[in-house]
Amino acid sequence: MNPRDVQKAMKRMGIKQEEIEANLVIIKTANGDLVIRDPHITKMNMMGQESLQITGDIEEVENDTTPEISDDDVATVMDQANCTKEEAEEALQENKGNIAEAILKLQSK
């Protein structure tokens, strides 16, 4: 079917299409990221509902499960929770680098 005919038919049905130029699309998931290189993106509006159609070269990238913890974060937890460096590092690792959660965990002991 001719692409122009398809567009005309969609317009008659009240579906608006718009091409979006992009170089890269990243979709964050719980288990990792979906990286879409050289994407072709079509934004569609049908009766006020917007949706995107994305095609391209898809690559799955797993999340790095070990958060990067800075010395400043460790020092902050040590100071606020009055604990050792090892306890602060362990609490930060267990709480995925979340300083507030690490402090609360150590204070509740």
Image (cartoon, rainbow, N blue to C red):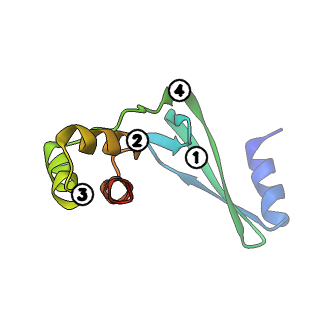
Determine contact: label 4, label 2, CB under 8 Å: no
**Residue identified by numbered label 1:** 41
Q: Earlier in the sequence, mark 3 or mark 1?
A: 1
Separation of residues labelled 4 and 2 (CA atoms): 29 Å
Tell me the number on the disc at residue 59. Answer: 4
Mark 1 burial class by Cα count in 10 Å: few <14, some 14-19, many 20+: some
Separation of residues labelled 3 and 2 (CA atoms): 15 Å
Separation of residues labelled 1 and 4 (CA atoms): 16 Å
**Residue identified by numbered label 3:** 81
Q: Residue at x 53, y 38 (%)?
A: 39
Separation of residues labelled 2 and 1 (CA atoms): 39 Å
Q: Earlier in the sequence, mark 1 or mark 4?
A: 1
Label 1 element class: strand
Please tell me whether mark 3 or mark 1 is closer to you in this view: 3
Residue 75 in the image, given as x and y percentages of width and height: 14, 50
Mark 3 burial class by Cα count in 10 Å: few <14, some 14-19, many 20+: some
- Residue sticking out furthest to the bottom: 48
Q: Nearer the viewer, residue 73 or 16?
A: 73
Label 3 element class: helix
In the figure, is residue 26 to the left or right of 10?
left
**Residue identified by numbered label 2:** 94
Residue 56 in the image, given as x and y percentages of width and height: 57, 32
Q: Nearer the viewer, residue 37 or 88?
A: 88
Q: Earlier in the sequence, mark 2 or mark 1?
A: 1
Determine contact: label 1, label 4, CB under 8 Å: no
Q: Earlier in the sequence, mark 4 or mark 3?
A: 4
- Occupied quadrant, residue 3: top right
Q: Earlier in the sequence, mark 3 or mark 2?
A: 3
Determine contact: label 3, label 1, CB under 8 Å: no
